[in-house]
Image (tube, grey):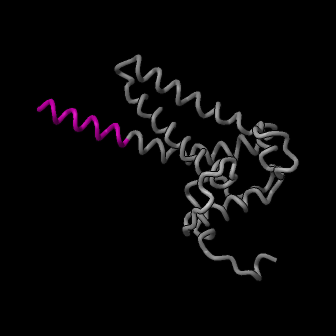
Amino acid sequence: MNPDCCKTVTMIANIFIVLGTVIAMEFVAWLAHKYLMHGFLWIWHEDHHKPHFEKDGFFEKNDLFFLVFAIPSALSYIFGSIYTELNWLFFIGIGISIYGLIYFLIHDVYIHQRFSWFRQLDSPYSRAILRAHGAHHAKTYKEDGVSFGLLFVHPKYFRKRDSRQEH
């Protein structure tokens, strides 16, 4: 087989690993949010559901989840770099990192305005994300939560709210 062909196939496979990992991370994040953050790790996540005026400082206990998700990414980079037969792990690490960056930009920067970078996003998708996240934060306790995902938004959040439904 042509060596250039093998390189092309490998590159395409690695791109699919990265993209597949980014997509899979939305489901991992959904499961972690619903069953861990709103479960036994509520002690870390609870302050994220409190209004800003009740919080002390810029950071929340909830920010510890950054480390929880960074560890598998870092380990994937390390083991994928060290062991040639596990080099696919390196690309999983890239996918986890990309998802983490997307999550940070959408969740922390856009939705919660922790940084003033994207204040003027206005599209049906960005409005749906805000509605879904608003529905999630309408609950200030761990039970009976809704909308645990971030990127895959239920179609109902794309519909304009009827002002009669909001009261």
Q: Position of residue 61 (x, y in %)?
A: 77, 36
Residue 4: in magenta span: yes
Task: Please indicate whether residue 136 sits to the left or right of residue 81 in the image.
Answer: right
Question: Quadrant of the rendered structure where residue 161 is?
Answer: bottom right
Dominant secondary structure, magenta: helix
Q: Residue furthest top?
A: 82
What residue lies at 66% left-to-right and 55% top-to-bottom? 111
Q: Quadrant of the N terminus?
A: top left
Out of 52 and 26, give the one closest to the viewer: 52
Out of 13 and 112, give the one closest to the viewer: 112
What residue lies at 51% left-to-right and 37% top-to-bottom? 96
Out of 126 and 14, give the one closest to the viewer: 126
Q: Residue furthest bottom?
A: 164
Q: Quadrant of the C terminus?
A: bottom right
Q: Position of residue 112 (x, y in %)?
A: 70, 52
Q: How many marks?
A: 0
Q: Residue furthest right?
A: 54
Q: Position of residue 160 (x, y in %)?
A: 64, 76
Task: Please indicate whether residue 70 sits to the left or right of residue 62 in the image.
Answer: left
Q: Position of residue 24 (x, y in %)?
A: 50, 45
Position of residue 131 relative to residue 40, above or below, is: below
What residue lies at 76% left-to-right and 79% top-to-bottom? 165
Q: Residue furthest front?
A: 116
Residue 118: in magenta span: no
Q: Which residues are magenta?
A: 1-16
Question: Quadrant of the rendered structure where residue 135 is?
Answer: bottom right
What residue lies at 15% left-to-right and 30% top-to-bottom? 3
